Amino acid sequence: MELIVKVGMLAAAALNYIFQALYFTHMVQLNSYRSERYRKWCRDHDDRLVNVRRMAPALCIPAMWLNGRVSDTVFYAVAAGILLLTALLHLPKKAKKPLVFTHRVWRLIVAEAVLFLLVATLCFFVSAQRAVGFIGLFSIIVWLWVGLVNGALQPLEKAIGDGYVKKAKARMEAQPELTVIGITGSYGKTSVKTFLHALLSVKYNTLMTPGSYNTTMGVVRTIREMLLPSHEIFLVEMGAKQVGDIQEICDLVHPQYGIISAIGEQHLETFLTLDNIIATKFELADSLPQNGCAFLNTDNPYIREREVSVPAVTYGVKSDSDADYRATDITVSVSGSEFTFITPDGESRRFSTRLLGEHTIQNLAGCMAVAHKLGVSLEEMVYPIRRLKPVEHRLQLLPNGYIDDAYNSNPAGFRSALDTLSKFEARRVLVTPGMVELGERQEELNRELGAYAADKCDIAVLVGEKQAPPLKEGLLSAGFPEEKLFVARDLKEALSLVQGLPPVEKQIVLLENDLPDNF
């Protein structure tokens, strides 16, 4: 009987370990598997590491007082109950962006399982007191074991990654006629990629990197699994969180054309300075051949002020813009937007689309400039532009009167979304947790955004008690009425507050940003 109960204790410890390890493996994945980012996440979120639920296995230590006072069977049973309770407290919850079970994650999970089996084996052969005490201590710091395993696997992952990159480069070299278009920017990359794919597909067999596959390994996976000899154009979204990230992707795919959609204060925690962001985004333009072309959004001051050494085509939507391609006379309604598009030779045409927001039309204008340069006429663009749908969670107007801009996470996009909200003749409700990953400037920028929102919305619902103060200060400093300002613990409570508002004939609700699970 004692053996069965001892095995039961280790089984309960395994269940607790599995649930916690899956959570922290998810956090490792959201931090790009980078050990330094995971360590920073642990420092910034110590409340998720040390709390009542995480520390419950510590009860095994005072339970050791029972050793010698009761039978080992009862002693193990008490420890099993404690560990089983801990496991139940850590049952997996639905995530906004679930853990993706990639090959790398499976390697992590296997290594984590091996570590636990070693610990369980040790506990099986030592005295009851040592077994209970050790398994209790081990179960308190699962976050540490996951981090150590991830760090230990880095050399292996680098070797595997290098092998994948080598194969992807060989695949690219085997298709010298393939036209590669790189797409980067602080924001707008995914929208530009999606819109451009729709326009170019009118004339070419086009492949784009799916979803948010905008890292080197994401591009490698796209090449290995999706690129076919029949593809004529390859659209590559290029993301970055530190200097050199864009260059690394360019060295892999060698783009002939590049689009820089926008540059702004984003990911300052890793970039540290705006100058680093600008230099990194322009790694794309610097990598283009002399017979290539850079497409630049000159509405953006950081792009406009930077010179490039290759031929450049400019685009914009500002009324005073002198860009080569321009979108003008933009109007917005509940059914979408209309605008006039003008080419460098003076040709113009009126377009209608279901897309919302000036910065969305700005992104579309860049795509139209590229497509036009590659031989797609304005007439051929009319139908695909009319059929375009917003990229999910990016200024997506829903049938229930909500504008879903949950994936927006930058100050410029936030301002543009607020401008869009202000154009609706209805009760305008803003629901937001503000911006993150802005380093030392985070509070200041959120305070500025709060002030900017004051005359753009009628009701403001701020999400997250930690995030709310700077936004709240900004709103109140700009004269926003305090009785129309609410603070919710989480998005669920925020939506309940919106649903509980007094009924009106027309209401539009902007869901601006939704923090990922690691915030």
Image (spheres, helix red, strand yellow):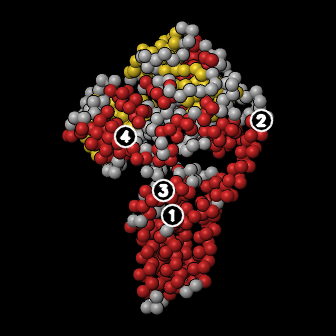
Quadrant assignment, res 279:
top right
**Label located before the other in sequence (4 or 2):** 2
Q: Nearer the viewer, residue 70 or 297?
A: 297
Q: Secondary structure at mark 4?
A: helix
For the residues carrying marks 1 and 4, which lies nearer the camera in this image? Answer: 4
Q: Furthest residue to the bottom?
A: 68
For the residues carrying marks 3 and 2, which lies nearer the camera in this image? Answer: 3
- The percent coordinates of residue 508 (x first, y second) are 33, 30
Residue 143 tag number: 1
Q: Secondary structure at mark 1?
A: helix
Marks 3 and 2 in Cβ contact (< 8 Å): no
Q: Nearer the viewer, residue 353 or 170?
A: 170
Tell me if 456 is positioned left or right of 349 in this view: left
Residue 35 appears in view: yes
Q: Nearer the viewer, residue 387 or 21?
A: 21
Q: Amino acid at mark 2?
A: Glu
**Label located before the other in sequence (1 or 3):** 3
Q: Secondary structure at mark 2?
A: helix
Q: Amino acid at mark 4?
A: Leu
| Marks 3/4: CA–CA distance | 22 Å
465 w.r.t. 280: above or below: below
Which residue is denoted by mark 2 in the rendering? 173
**Label located before the other in sequence (2 or 1):** 1
Q: Determine the residue positioned at 35% across, 45% down.
A: 443
| Marks 2/1: CA–CA distance | 42 Å
